[in-house]
Amino acid sequence: MAAKEYGYEWVAVYSAGEPEWRKEGLPLWGNEPSGVADVAPVELPVVPPGKLPRSISAADFRKLVTETPNEVVVLDVRSAGEYSAGHLPGAINLPDDQFHANYDELVKKVPANKRVVIHCVTGIRAEGVYHALATRGKYENPHGVQFLNATMSIEPDGSFTVQ
């Protein structure tokens, strides 16, 4: 965990995930005692007719990248180590932590001339990058951006399973 590498001692992963955390009314960012004020959630725009939904299903992702790979850019937001251990052919690696920290520079590396699908291992990091693209500005893609909200594993040869 990156937080432990930065010296944080009380680090845990909530195994039920963000939806359950949110359902319990727990904060998603900052808190008053930490000195970081909570921020109001940003409502993502409603998808207009004819546009892509925020996430892509596992079946649609599998079909898209295997049957029409030239019609999509795959953005892999896993760490460089995860990427080097196995990645989809042609995928662009922009690790999510670097992307968020250097947004103004790295958003320029996300193609705007094709459909883009963002993935990680479970969908959490991919959704975070999707959210940044949708809300932070400086990126407009008329062809659409989606994230894969599913568990995915990739072999060294580029073959993959997604559930």
Image: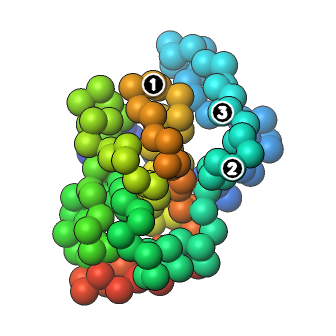
Residue tagged by mark 2? Answer: 50
Q: Earlier in the sequence, mark 2 or mark 1?
A: 2
Residue at image position (68%, 32%) is 45
Judge left or right: residue 43 versus residue 72. right
Residue at image position (61%, 18%) is 39
Under mark 1, the amino acid is Gly
- Residue 112 visible somewhere in the drawing: yes
Q: Earlier in the sequence, mark 3 or mark 2?
A: 3
Which disc, if any, is residue 44? 3
Name the image quarter holding residue 42. Answer: top right
Residue at image position (61%, 78%) is 59
**14, 95: nearer the viewer:** 95
Judge left or right: residue 124 versus residue 4. right
Q: Tag 3's secondary structure?
A: loop
- Residue 18 visible somewhere in the drawing: no
Q: Earlier in the sequence, mark 3 or mark 1?
A: 3
Quarter of the image that includes the C terminus: bottom right
In the image, residue 55 lies at what x, y percent? 61, 56
Q: Alpha-carbon distance for marks 2 and 1?
A: 21 Å
Would you place residue 97 above or below residue 74 in this image?
A: above
Q: Alpha-carbon distance for marks 3 and 1?
A: 12 Å
Q: Residues within 10 Å of mark 2 (few under 14, many from 20)?
A: few
Residue at image position (36%, 79%) is 154
Q: Alpha-carbon distance for marks 3 and 2?
A: 17 Å
Under mark 3, the amino acid is Leu
Residue tagged by mark 1? Answer: 137
Q: Mark 2, mark 1: which one is toward the viewer?
A: 2
In the image, residue 25 lies at what x, y percent? 78, 35
